[in-house]
């Protein structure tokens, strides 16, 4: 099959989209990813491991802050129109067989192409878009996205989401079958290997945002002896600069900035524990399976995460980490507990790897993805 994928980021560090596209390529399909280079900093065209990538730019640059949502919404519409037209041009050469839309902000493109080209539409919901937008938009505006998503899902042929938490939500708004393809990673080893690192090291690499308790993480490790904390990733410039500044004020918190996603697993194996604190009042993240959880499991590393989240639910079930309250005090206590108890770290890490081998690995998720495409 020839697959047209759409994603509203520059597709330079999206492990889920890359993993799915790579699996389809290895199974003999052709994949073209049409992405949105909002910051106008990425290569316009690229062949990435057999994946044809086309990054489109709009005339308007992204704006940040509460008052920018109208302008950014208009910018999104411009990109959707541009992506749709580019797909039609490419279709004259490739004749696409299926459209695969990642998240709600690309779904309109897929619906238009389904209508125009008479091809199936796969909707891959990494987020609950209305809940995500509620972080920065007025609630009445965010509710419009929830309503629109409920309406547009009716036009989808295959529905995918990243875990049981979001699957339960979508099951409540649509009668369509929902397949769960989790944010798991390829197995690295079938045997447990302790970290080759003398210093007790905590790791967080991912989205840099206030709902991830990263400022609190820096506060928790500040002046904590025998602990090193590494933070990397990308996010809104203002928040990132503030976080970087806070790290610079400590002796044991290092800020890396952007980290290529193909380096994350190697860095996780060197760490003693992974931190994934998500504010449970953030409705979108509360229901999703964090990438950090999948990374920690395949590396055999314990994770520290929050009570009241889907990631915490999995961690408690598999006994693969510490699940704590959403506070600096609880986080510091969990860090000290893991620092001072190597036997506990190893037991939790072994449980994590055991769970990865049994269920939480990309090989098993890939089988489900390819079966879905076979059904088309």
Image (spheres, rainbow, N blue to C red):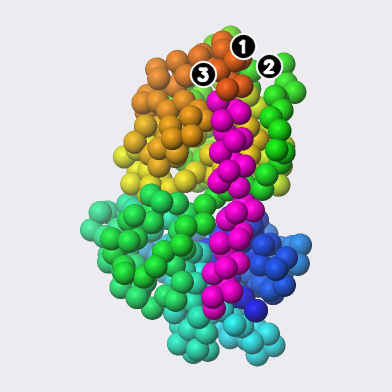
CB within 8 Å, label 1 to label 2: yes
* Residue of label 2: 199
In magenta segment, residue 116: no
Residue 335's label in the rendered image is: 3
Real-space Cα distance between discs 1 and 2?
7 Å
- Residue range (magenta): 348-376
**Is 19 left or right of 319, judged from the image as shown?**
right
Taking 61 as reference, is 298 above or below it? above
**Is 7 left or right of 108, judged from the image as shown?**
right
Q: Which mark sits nearer the N-terminus, 1 or 3?
A: 1
User: What residue sits 48% from the left and 34% below the top?
Assistant: 318
Q: Which mark sits nearer the N-terminus, 1 or 2?
A: 2
Q: Dot 1: what SS? A: loop
User: What residue sits 69% from the left and 74% below the top?
Assistant: 30
Q: Which mark sits nearer the N-terminus, 2 or 3?
A: 2
Q: Position of residue 257 (x, y in %)?
A: 63, 38
Real-space Cα distance between discs 1 and 3?
10 Å
CB within 8 Å, label 2 to label 3: no
* Residue of label 1: 226
Crowd tier of the residue under label 2, counting other residues whose Cα lies within 10 Å: few below 14, some 14–19, many 20 or above? some
Q: In this orientation, which residue lies closer to the viewer: 135 or 70?
A: 135
């Amino acid at each position: 099959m020839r697959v047209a994928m759409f994603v509203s980021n520059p597709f330079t560090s999206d492990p889920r989209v890359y993993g799915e596209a790579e699996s389809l390529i290895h199974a003999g399909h052709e994949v073209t990813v049409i992405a949105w280079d909002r910051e106008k900093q990425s290569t316009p065209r690229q062949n990435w491991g057999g994946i044809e990538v086309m990054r489109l730019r709009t005339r308007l640059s992204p704006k940040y802050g509460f008052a920018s949502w109208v302008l950014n919404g208009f910018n999104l519409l411009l990109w959707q129109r541009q992506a749709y037209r580019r797909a039609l041009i490419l279709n004259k050469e490739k004749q696409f067989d299926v459209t695969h839309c990642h998240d709600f902000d690309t779904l309109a493109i897929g619906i238009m192409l389904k209508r125009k080209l008479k091809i199936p539409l796969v909707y891959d919901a990494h987020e609950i878009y209305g809940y995500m937008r509620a972080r920065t938009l007025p609630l009445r505006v965010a509710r419009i996205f929830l309503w629109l998503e409920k309406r547009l899902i009716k036009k989808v042929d295959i529905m995918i989401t990243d875990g049981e938490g979001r699957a339960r939500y979508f099951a409540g708004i649509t009668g369509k079958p929902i397949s769960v393809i989790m944010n798991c990673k390829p197995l690295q080893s079938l045997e447990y290997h302790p970290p080759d690192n003398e210093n007790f090291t905590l790791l967080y690499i991912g989205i840099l945002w206030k709902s991830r308790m990263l400022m609190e993480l820096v506060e928790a490790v500040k002046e904590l002896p025998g602990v090193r904390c590494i933070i990397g990733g990308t996010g809104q410039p203002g928040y990132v600069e503030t976080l970087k500044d806070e790290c610079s004020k400590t002796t044991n918190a290092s800020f890396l900035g952007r980290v290529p996603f193909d380096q994350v697993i190697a860095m996780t194996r060197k760490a003693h524990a992974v931190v994934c604190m998500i504010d449970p009042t953030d409705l979108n993240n509360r229901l999703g399976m964090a990438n950090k959880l999948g990374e920690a499991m395949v590396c055999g590393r314990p994770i520290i995460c929050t009570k009241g989240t889907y990631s915490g639910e999995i961690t408690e079930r598999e006994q693969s980490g510490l699940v704590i309250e959403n506070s600096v005090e609880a986080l510091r206590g969990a860090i000290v507990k893991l620092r001072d108890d190597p036997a506990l770290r190893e037991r939790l890490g072994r449980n994590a790897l055991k769970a990865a081998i049994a269920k939480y690995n990309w090989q098993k998720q890939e089988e489900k993805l390819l079966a879905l495409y076979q059904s088309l």
